[in-house]
Image (cartoon, helix red, strand yellow):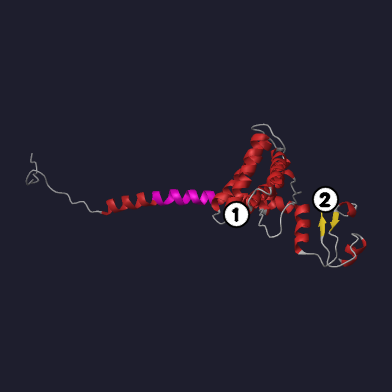
């Protein structure tokens, strides 16, 4: 509320622009998590855009997407850490990876499909190179972006920012709630049911067509015909 913002966060003018960093809770020292844009209410939009870009890393109006459900899956995936092959935790990670991959396959709408491919790559590379893969990639991409930003097109800058945004879901995973885990389980069950239903639709019509063909053949009446002339029944007498 307004009193909290004024008394606790130190805001003196309205409207004001604040950046609140991750990790702030009621036990935190709020001043450590809050950055205020100075200048009052007469700021130019370019100043606000620079403030947002400096603190968040993305420009206003730039469509950088994330998929909330995939972020929850990524958090649970990373929580198992670096696992040994064929361990129970590695199997769980594989299941989560397949869940996201299957979700991407069954969706044909953009940007879900293309964004899903970036999540899939992050899952695969994390399993292959360790859970610190995303952290290393974020630093690498961010450094490259900072060095060549003035040489890159807006489209290329957006591509970098999109990749960084998704990798941060693995580097800085959110804390999953019981509801998040419940949604993961529900989605897994639904996708498993969809896969089974798809297989049944493929198998059952083929079996049905074969049965129908047999019925048609068997329904044709068979007329017995005599072969080799007329035959007369004879009665034996003793």
Which element carries disc 2, helix, strand or loop?
Answer: loop
Q: Is residue 41 magenta?
A: no
**Which segment did they paint magenta?**
194-207
Rendered location of residue 228, percent (x, y): 8, 43
The residue indicated by pointer 1 is 112
| Residue 73 in view in this figure | no
Q: Is residue 180 left or right of residue 40?
A: left
* Front one among 168 and 83: 168
User: In this view of the protein, can residue 144 be seen by the observer?
Assistant: yes
Image coords of residue 16 (percent x, y): 84, 64
Q: Quadrant of residue 48?
A: bottom right
Give how far apart the Cα atoms at labels 2 and 1 are: 28 Å
User: Can you say whether 237 is above or below 23 in the image?
Assistant: above
Q: Which residue is mark 2?
A: 23
Q: Secondary structure at mark 1?
A: helix
Q: Position of residue 6 (x, y in %)?
A: 90, 64
Judge from the rendering whether residue 202 lies leftward or rightward of residue 144; answer left or right: left
Earlier sequence position, callout 2 versus callout 1: 2
- Overall secondary structure of the magenta section: helix
Instruction: Note whether 161 is above or below 48 in the view shown.
Output: above
């Amino acid at each position: 509320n307004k009193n909290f913002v004024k008394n606790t966060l130190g805001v003196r003018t309205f409207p004001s622009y604040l950046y609140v960093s991750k990790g702030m809770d009621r036990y935190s020292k709020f001043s450590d998590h809050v950055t205020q844009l100075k200048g009052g209410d007469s700021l130019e939009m370019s100043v606000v855009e620079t403030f947002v870009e400096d603190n968040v890393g993305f420009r206003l109006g730039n469509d950088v997407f994330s998929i909330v459900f995939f972020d929850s899956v990524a958090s649970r995936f990373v929580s198992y850490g670096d696992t040994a092959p064929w361990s129970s935790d590695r199997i769980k990670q594989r299941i989560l990876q397949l869940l996201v991959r299957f979700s991407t396959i069954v969706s044909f709408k953009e940007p879900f499909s293309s964004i899903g491919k970036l999540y899939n790559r992050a899952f695969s590379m994390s399993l292959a190179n360790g859970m610190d893969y995303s952290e290393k990639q974020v630093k690498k991409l961010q450094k490259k972006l900072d060095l060549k930003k003035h040489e890159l097109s807006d489209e290329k800058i957006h591509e970098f920012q999109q990749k960084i945004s998704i990798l941060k879901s693995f580097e800085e995973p959110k804390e999953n709630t019981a509801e998040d885990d419940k949604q993961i389980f529900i989605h897994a069950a639904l996708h498993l049911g969809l896969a089974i239903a798809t297989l049944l639709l493929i198998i059952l019509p083929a079996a049905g067509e074969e049965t129908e063909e047999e019925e048609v053949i068997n329904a044709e009446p068979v007329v017995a015909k005599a072969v080799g002339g007329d035959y007369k029944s004879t009665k034996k007498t003793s």
